[in-house]
Image (cartoon, rainbow, N blue to C red):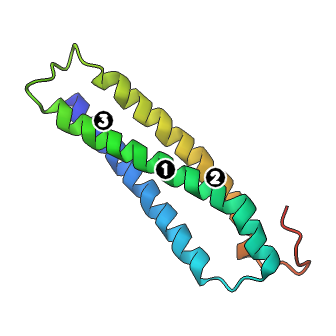
Amino acid sequence: MEYEDSIISAINNTNALLNAINSVKTELCRLNLNFCEKEYIENCVNPILIILSSLVLTSYELSVSVSILSSSPIVPPKKSKLKNTIHLIYKMNEECEELFKVLKKRLKPLIHDNADGCKFL
């Protein structure tokens, strides 16, 4: 039961991050951007967004796999490495949260009107 609760918690956290990433992508598509802003997004936002998306998706898939394996009669919980995988998922989610903070910081110049043009960094 403890495994299932932590797995469900990890899945919920990962799902929330995935929804936040999709929201950021949607909002970026709605912005009217000039050349400097597009360049800034290409160089400073998109790489983090791609890494974050990949990391969140991997974490989510691991969570689902652990959930399936934990209820499987074939995998004995005490002898398996499911607990290590759950710890890995939590570490990955912590990294995702840190990347999301960096992403938010890098998006602030785009969200707030910048009278100085290309001064994003």
Locate the C terminus by quadrant.
bottom right
> In the drawing, what numbered circle is on residue 91?
none
Task: Tell me what residue is drawn at x 43 percent, y 30 percent.
Answer: 88
In the displayed structure image, the side of residue 39 where residue 16 appears, left or right: left
Task: Say whether disc 3 or disc 2 marks the residue closer to the N-terminus.
Answer: 3
Residue 27, relative to residue 5: is it above or below? below
> On residue 101, which mark appears?
2
Estimate the spatial distance between the alpha carbons at disc 3 and disc 2, rounded to whole Å.
24 Å
Residue 112 placement (x, y as % from top left) = 75, 76
Q: Distance between the residues labelled 1 and 3?
A: 22 Å
Rounded to the nearest angstrom, the CA distance separating label 1 from label 2 is: 16 Å
Which residue shows up at 77% across the image and 70% down it?
Answer: 39
Please name the residue that numbered disc 1 is placed on. Answer: 54
Give amino acid for label 1.
Answer: Ser
Residue ranking furthest to the top: 79
Crowd around label 3: few <14 · some 14–19 · many ≥20 (10 Å): some
Q: Residue furthest bottom?
A: 32
Left or right: residue 120 compared with residue 18: right
In which quarter of the view is residue 78 placed?
top left
**Which is closer to the viewer, label 1 or label 3?**
1
Q: Which image quadrant: the N terminus?
A: top left
Specify the label residue 6 is tagged with: 3
Q: List x then y, in percent, for residue 19.
A: 43, 63
Are the residues at dot 1 and dot 2 in contact (C-beta closer than 8 Å)? no
